[in-house]
C-alpha cells in the first residue's frame, strides 16, 4: 500500500450530506482484508429488490467480481451490494471465482435473497488471493445494523489510494414528486475507464425501470466516467452500478417527464467523475481538454484522449509550461483526420496557435500567468468538421511516480 | 532547453570508431540556432548522388523538413543531407515551408546539385519559426571542409536532450568484397515511433539499389525503431534515412548474396534503437517486453506496447517492484485476444503467474533481487497462438517529470 498521502489540493472544499433514500440502508465493517485500523467493507441493502443497471471494464482480464456482476445483471434485481477494499480479487483464477461465490453465498444468506440478487466489487492489489472467510459474521452484522445515513462512511470504506471520499447528490421532480439521486465512487490510479471507472454506485428512489436506468447510465458514462483519465491505464475491476428502489412506473427512456431526472442523474455521474480526476494520484492540476471541429465524435474523443494521456503534455502542465508544440504532437499522433494548417490551439481564452503557426503577438506573460491555475483548459479546434468532445485529465508529477513506485510494499 | 543531464547510466561503455565510407564526407558547424557554444548543424555530402530510402513519422502534423524529404524521395538520389538541432521547424506554417526551401536552396548551391537531391531534418522545440538565413555561409564551408571521419562529431551536433551521441557500425561481405554500414541517431524524448524514430541516418557503400535499401529499411524498422518506446509520444519529425554510395549492382531484395548484408544492416538499426531506449529521458532501467503465444503479430505488438507504455508498469519497474498485477492490467487493456486463465507472466526466468493465478511457491526474494538489474525482461505468454513480438521500453522516474516540466525554459 502506498504511504498515506496528504489530501489532494483539488479536493472539493465542501462535502455534501447525502439524504436518505427510501428502501436502502448502508453499513461498513473492519474485516482486516489488508488494512489495519480502518473500515474496508461496505454493504448496501435494499428493502425490496431494486432495479439495477451496470457498465463494466472492457479489460480482457476482468476481475472475478466483475464476472459475477455481469452474470447477475440480466435478472436486473439487486438485494445487496458488498464492496471491499485492499484486495481486487483480480487474476486470482479458480480461487478468485471461489471467493466471490463464497462471499455471495454469505451475503445472500444474510440478506435473505437469491444468489443472483447479490452484487460484489473488490478493489486493491491484483493477484493476491482474497480470503472470503474474513467476511463471515461481518456481512450478517452489517445487514442488521445498516442505517439510511451511512453514505459518507461507505464511500470512505472503499477508498484505496484515494485521498478523499467521493459522494454526490441531486434532487429532482418527476410529475410533481421529489426524488433523490445519491452516488459514491472511488478512483485515484489505474484510471482510464473504457466503460466505467473503477467503482461507482448510484442509487435513486425515482420510479424507473431497469431499462431506463441502463439507458441513461450507458449514455452518461460516455461523457463522464469514460471522459476522464489519470494515467491511461484501464483497471481490471471498473464497475459502475445504478440502483432504483421504487416501482418501475416509468419504462420509456424517451419519456418527456424524465427529462429533469435524466439530467440530475447525469449531474451525479459528472460530479463523481470530476472528483475522481481531482484525486488523481499526485495531481496538482486538472486539464480540461476541449476538442472541437473534428470530423466525427469518435475522432474528437481520440484526439482529446491522446492529449490527456500524453506524458509530455502532462509534464508540461505540471511544470506550468504552455508548451503548445506538444499539443500539436498529441493531435498528430492520434491518427485521426487533422490538418496541421487549420489547427487552432488555446490555453483558456488565450489563442497561442492558429492556421498552423504561432499566433502573432500573443502574450507569453499572460499565458504563463494562466498556467498557474488549478484547472487548465486546453482548447483545440481541428477546423475540419463540427464534432466535439471534452475530456478531463491531470498533470504528471513526481508524486505520481513516487506513489506508484512502491504501491505493493 | 532542459538543464544538461548527467550521462545516462545505461550509456554504452564503449563508443565504436566509425570507419570512412567511400563516397561520403561529413562536417559540423555552430550556426547558433538556439544553443550557444556547441555545434548544432551537421552536413553529409555524397561525392556522387547516393541511392536513398526513407521512412517518416505517421503524425498527421509532420514537420516541414519531413514534408520536403517525402517530396524528394521518389527521385531516390541524395547529394547532401543537412540536419540542425535546437529547432524542429514543426508547426511553423508557411514560414516553415519557406525556411526549408531556403535551406535546401543554400544546400543545393553549396553541393552543386539539384534541389530535389537535398535532404533536411530539424529537431528541437516545436512551433518556433526557424531562421534559415543562419545557415548561410555555414553550409558552403561545411561542404568545403567535410571529412570522411567526422561521424561522431556529426552525431553530437544533432543531440537535443540526448545524454550521449549514438553511432553504430558493421562490416559485411558481399560476393567476397567487404562493405561497411555506418549509422547515427538521436532520441531521448517524444519517442514512440510509429514508423521510424526521431532522427537516424544509415550509410553504406554496399552496391545496392534504392529499392533494395527501401525494402530492408521498411522491414527492419518494424522490429527495431518501431519496437521501442520511451513515453508513447510520437514526434512530428521522425525521420530515418538510408544512403548507399556505390553502384546499384544488386537490385533484388531477395538476392541470396545479400543475406549477410541484410543482417548487418538490421544490426545497425537494432543497435541504434537500443541506444535510443538506453538514453530515454530520466531512464534508470530498460524493459524488454517479450510477448509470445498471441493470435497475430499485430496483437502481440499491441500487447507489448500496452505494457511498455503503461505508466503503472513503468513506475513499478522504477520502484524495483515486481508488480505483475499491473502487467495483467496492461494485457487486459490492450483489447487484443487474451484469456485471463491461460496467461503466464515472468520476470527474467522467474515465472510469477501461470494459468490465471499466482505461481505457487515462486520466490519473492529472488524476484526482488532480479528487479535490481539494469535490464528487466518481462515475459508474457498469452497462451492462445504462436505469434510473438519483442518491444523495448524504460522506467518512468521523477527525473523524466523534471526534464519535461521545463523543456522550453
Image (cartoon, coloured by chain):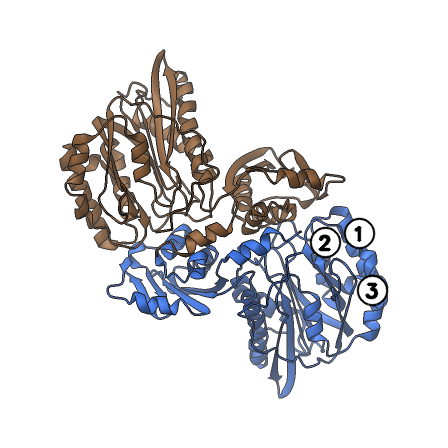
Chain colours: A blue, B brown
- Around disc 1, counting alpha carbons within 10 Å, would you say few (fewer than 14), some (14 to 19), or many (20 or more)? some
Residue B122, x across and y down, in percent: 29, 44
| Helix, strand or loop at mark 3 | helix
Residue at label 3?
A108
For label 3, the crowd category at 10 Å Cα-Cα, with few meaning under 14, some 14 to 19 and many 20 or more, is many
Tag 1's secondary structure? helix
* Percent coordinates x, y for residue A13 in the rendering: 56, 77
> If you read the primary sequence from the N terminus, does the residue marked by circle 1 or circle 3 appear first?
1
Answer yes or no: is residue B289 visible: no
Please state the chain letter of the residue tagged with numbered disc 2 in the rendered image.
Answer: A
Distance from disc 1 to disc 3, alpha carbons, whole Å, reads: 15 Å
> Where is mark 1, residue-wise?
A98
Asked whether the viewer can see residue A189, the reply is yes
Disc 2 designates what residue?
A: A89
Earlier sequence position, callout 2 versus callout 1: 2
Left or right of residue B116, residue B234 in this image: right
Q: Is residue A91 above or below residue B239?
A: below
Residue A50, image x and y in percent? 73, 72
How crowded pointer 2 is (Cα within 10 Å; few <14, some 14-19, many 20+) is rated as many
Q: Nearer the viewer, residue B74 or A210?
A: B74
| Quarter of the image where one finds residue B215 | top left
Residue found 46% across the figure and 35% down from its top: B274
State the residue lying farthest toward the top: B176
Give whichever of B272, A385 is nearer the camera. B272
Q: Please give the chain letter of the residue carrying mark 3.
A: A
Which comes before the other along the chain, label 2 or label 3? 2
Determine the CA span between mark 2 and mark 1: 10 Å
Query: Which residue is pictured at 35% across the width and 55% down the height?
Result: B408
Image position of A361 (left or right of A336)? left
Image quadrant of residue B370? top right
Amino acid at each position: 500500500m502506498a504511504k498515506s498521502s496528504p489530501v489532494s489540493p483539488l479536493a472539493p472544499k465542501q462535502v455534501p450530506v447525502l439524504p436518505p433514500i427510501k428502501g436502502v440502508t448502508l453499513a461498513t465493517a473492519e474485516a482486516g482484508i489488508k488494512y489495519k485500523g480502518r473500515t474496508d467493507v461496505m454493504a448496501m441493502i435494499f428493502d425490496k429488490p431494486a432495479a439495477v443497471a451496470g457498465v463494466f471494464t472492457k479489460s480482457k482480464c476482468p476481475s472475478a467480481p466483475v464476472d459475477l456482476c455481469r452474470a447477475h445483471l440480466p435478472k436486473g434485481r439487486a438485494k445487496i451490494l458488498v464492496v471491499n477494499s485492499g484486495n481486487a480479487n483480480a487474476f486470482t483464477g479458480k480461487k478468485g471465482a471461489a471467493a466471490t461465490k463464497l462471499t455471495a453465498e454469505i451475503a445472500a444468506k444474510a440478506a435473505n435473497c437469491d444468489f443472483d440478487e447479490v452484487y460484489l466489487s473488490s478493489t486493491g492489489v491484483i493477484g493476491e488471493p482474497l480470503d472470503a472467510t474474513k467476511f463471515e459474521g461481518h456481512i450478517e452484522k452489517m445487514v442488521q445494523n445498516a442505517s439510511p445515513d451511512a453514505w459518507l462512511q461507505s464511500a470512505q470504506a472503499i477508498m484505496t489510494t484515494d485521498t478523499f471520499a467521493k459522494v454526490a447528490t441531486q434532487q429532482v421532480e418527476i410529475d410533481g414528486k421529489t426524488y433523490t439521486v445519491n452516488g459514491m465512487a472511488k478512483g485515484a490510479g489505474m484510471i482510464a475507464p473504457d466503460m466505467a471507472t473503477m467503482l461507482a454506485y448510484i442509487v435513486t428512489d425515482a420510479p424507473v425501470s431497469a431499462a431506463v436506468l441502463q439507458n441513461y447510465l450507458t449514455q452518461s458514462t460516455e461523457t463522464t466516467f469514460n471522459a476522464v483519465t489519470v494515467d491511461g491505464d484501464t483497471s481490471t475491476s471498473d464497475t459502475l452500478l445504478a440502483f432504483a428502489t421504487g416501482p418501475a412506473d416509468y419504462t420509456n427512456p424517451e419519456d418527456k417527464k424524465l427529462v429533469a431526472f435524466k439530467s440530475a442523474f447525469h449531474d451525479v455521474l459528472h460530479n463523481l467523475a470530476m472528483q475522481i480526476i481531482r484525486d488523481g494520484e499526485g495531481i496538482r492540476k486538472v486539464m480540461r481538454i476541449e476538442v472541437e471541429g473534428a470530423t466525427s465524435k469518435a475522432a474528437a474523443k481520440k484526439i482529446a484522449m491522446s492529449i490527456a494521456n500524453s506524458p509530455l503534455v502532462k509534464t508540461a502542465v505540471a511544470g506550468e509550461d504552455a508548451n503548445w508544440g506538444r499539443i500539436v504532437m498529441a493531435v498528430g499522433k492520434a491518427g485521426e483526420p487533422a490538418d496541421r494548417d487549420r489547427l487552432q490551439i488555446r490555453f483558456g481564452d488565450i489563442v497561442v496557435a492558429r492556421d498552423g503557426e504561432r499566433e502573432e503577438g500573443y502574450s507569453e506573460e499572460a499565458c504563463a500567468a494562466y498556467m498557474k491555475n488549478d484547472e487548465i483548459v486546453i482548447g483545440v479546434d481541428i477546423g475540419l468538421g463540427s464534432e466535439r468532445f471534452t475530456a478531463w485529465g491531470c498533470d504528471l508529477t513526481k508524486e505520481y511516480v513516487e506513489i506508484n513506485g512502491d504501491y505493493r510494499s
